[in-house]
Image: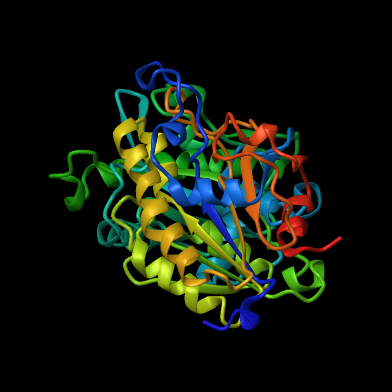
Amino acid sequence: MDGNQYRGRAVIFLADGMADEPLAELDGKTPLEAVDTPFMDRIAAEGASGTFLSLPDGFPTSSDAANMSVMGYSLAQFYPGRGPIEAESQGIVLKDDDIAWRCNLVNVRDGILRDYSAGHIDNSVSTKIMEDLQAHFGSDKVTFHPGVSYRNLLVLHGKEFSANIGYSKPDSSQDEPVSELELHPLDDTEEAKHTVAFLKELSEKTAVFLEKHALNASASVPANRIWPWSPGHKPHFTSFSEKYAGKTGAVISAVDVIFGIAKCARMDVIKVPGATGFIDTNYEGKARAAIDALCDHDMVYVHLEAIDECSHLGDLKLKMQAIREFDRRIVAPVMKAFEGCGVTFAILPDHPVPLHLRKHTRTPVPVAICGEHITPDGVMHYSEKDAPNGSLGFLQGEAFMRKVLNLA
């Protein structure tokens, strides 16, 4: 491979939810530290390490906010809510008065939110359920849109509705009483009050419908409730190329939230057949797509959702498996493909998901970057413990992306 073609280009490996906390069952190590990750370690050993603040105070602890931060988009300036970002991914054209909501299909039992994903509901099942919800409850005021598995959308139409609504993030609220997680107005306007009342009534009616749905009859974890959250209006981003001196970017993922950010930033979206957003994803397909994409992009962002999902399940064995597979089946082949070509490589999670909490935290994440413009700092392993000792120090805002792209 001709190194001159790729010199100065970059690949960012984004391991969603990989950072964790020390566990007694791992003799005080984190899952990342306990797994053999020779290629992530190589990025650290050949480059420099540090930490990055992806979830600043005042914004949701969600992957949309975290990945926007990694890409250098100010949340105060650009954050629109999860719903509008995923609507952008799905090609749903929002009018000025439309409010898009992320709408999980969840499982509630005995008044408790038991599973934010309805057992990681199969995509074909969730699609049929969302289509049936649209057929029975869709109107000129509300529409339902299927996404990937439990990750779906609901859009409210009209000036009578407000996006200024408080909500509970479902994957951070498992095993909590639904009565303590209800939507609530964040102001005293009639629109906010009406929105909460409208969605409460809709949730109650759809719950009755879902309890009787044929596809839930034999499900071990039935999708028996809708869960609207993170609303907002049509997003407006500065393009990635405008922000970063004309650099071009491509994004590889399985989930709408990452594709939506990419589309908002006018980056190229690359969808890989068999990419599922879980442990059974097409690792090799993602690696191949990243290798191909670097032919005509300055930066390729390779996102893996599986580690985050395993973390929310609280499954240590699966999380370690997902980390191992990420290193072996994505990071390794991409790095090998560009050996000696002058490509910059970076590794980081978007946020931590400690297994004992099963939800996101604001702890800064470990970062490692290697490339011809990066002076090695002596840190030999990529981990939560080692990264803070690196020469990159504490990064925030655009600093990480500019360092990767070698921009002052």
Residue that protrudes farthest toward the right in the picture: 408
Residue 203 falls in which quadrant of the image? top left
The image shows a total of numbered marks equal to 0
Q: Position of residue 236 (x, y in %)?
A: 74, 64
Q: Position of residue 156 (x, y in %)?
A: 57, 56
Q: Is residue 316 above or below residue 281?
A: above
Residue 351 falls in which quadrant of the image? top right
Horizontal side, residue 30 vs residue 266: left or right: left
Residue 299 falls in which quadrant of the image? bottom right
Residue drawn at point x = 69 percent, y = 32 percent: 389
Horizontal side, residue 274 vs residue 376: left or right: left
- Who is closer to the viewer here, 4 or 278? 4
Q: Position of residue 18 (x, y in %)?
A: 48, 40
- Who is closer to the viewer here, 342 or 143? 342
Colour setting: rainbow
Residue drawn at point x = 43 percent, y = 45 percent: 37
Q: Is residue 141 visible?
A: no
Residue drawn at point x = 64 percent, y = 55 percent: 370
Q: Is residue 349 above or below residue 269?
A: above
Horizontal side, residue 284 vs residue 256: left or right: left
Q: Is residue 127 above or below residue 6?
A: above
Q: Position of residue 305 (x, y in %)?
A: 44, 51
